[in-house]
Amino acid sequence: MYRKDKKDEYYSRRAREEGYPARSVYKLKEIDEKYKIFRRGDQVLDLGCAPGSWMMYVSEKIGSNGMVVGVDFEELKMPLAANTRFVKKDILHLTHEDFYQRESARIFDVVVSDLAPKTTGVKTADVVNSIMLANKALALAKLVLRPRGNFICKVFDGELAEEFFEEVKKNFEFVKRFRPKAVSKESREFYLVALDLKLLNKD
């Protein structure tokens, strides 16, 4: 049976004290502090946003002139700030048309994805399912990101993760693997930090 280690307990307690729904906020915060992902006024797409910690953090970072759109098939259990919007939908059925009704799809400065499959305990299956979600997130990012936009994506480590890493490198100028301190010791997850989208095909 899985038991939280002291690090997990520390971040969970800290999240409660600071008013965040989950400790995952500290993963994004560490990434942002290291790589300077968000700016005031940014338009941000948050994939797999429930329970809402990343949306709250991003909302604070981008200010009143920015907007964060969160997507999840689960309802949020938190009030939405004025600069946030929630789309209740399965990521696998999501298209760029859910966000815009004009010719140009490129409306976001940053796409973040904390999507993760329900784990089965079978490492190979879990990695395959993780990469399926990561590929969907990447496909959407390539459609909706503005030139030089940024992409943050959770991935489970494994052979397929290396293939996904190489695919992301084709589309962004800077790509790094990063494992935040708040990730559980037993977890296989890490994050790809991809900065400065290349527009390989002009649209």
Image: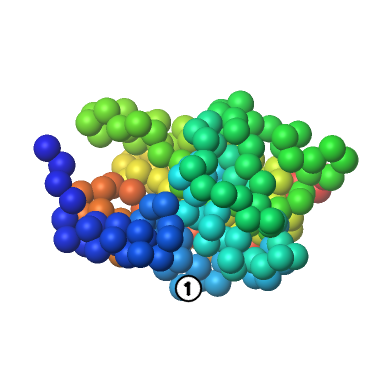
Q: Position of residue 143 (x, y in %)?
A: 70, 43
> What is the total number of numbered labels drawn onto the structure image?
1
- In the image: residue 137, left or right of residue 155: right
Which residue is the site of mark 1?
33
Q: Tell me the quarter of the image containing the C terminus.
A: top right
143 shown above or below 117: below
137 shown above or below 58: above
140 shown above or below 16: above
- In the image: residue 81, left or right of residue 193: right
Q: Tell me the quarter of the image containing the N terminus.
A: top left
Q: Position of residue 92 (x, y in %)?
A: 56, 28
Model colouring: rainbow
Q: What SS does tag 1 mark?
A: helix
- In the image: residue 131, left or right of residue 90: left
Q: Is residue 134 visible?
A: no
Q: Nearer the viewer, residue 140 or 99?
A: 99
Residue at 75% x, 65% y: name it.
Answer: 65
Residue at 28% x, 47% y: name it.
Answer: 188
Residue at 67% x, 67% y: name it.
Answer: 63
In this view, the residue farthest toward the left is 1
* Residue 18 lies in quadrant: bottom left
Q: Position of residue 109 (x, y in %)?
A: 69, 58
The amino acid at mark 1 is: Glu
Residue at 68% x, 57% y: name it.
Answer: 83
Crowdedness near tag 1: few (<14), some (14–19) or many (≥20) residues, C-alpha within 10 Å: few
Q: Is residue 7 visible?
A: yes
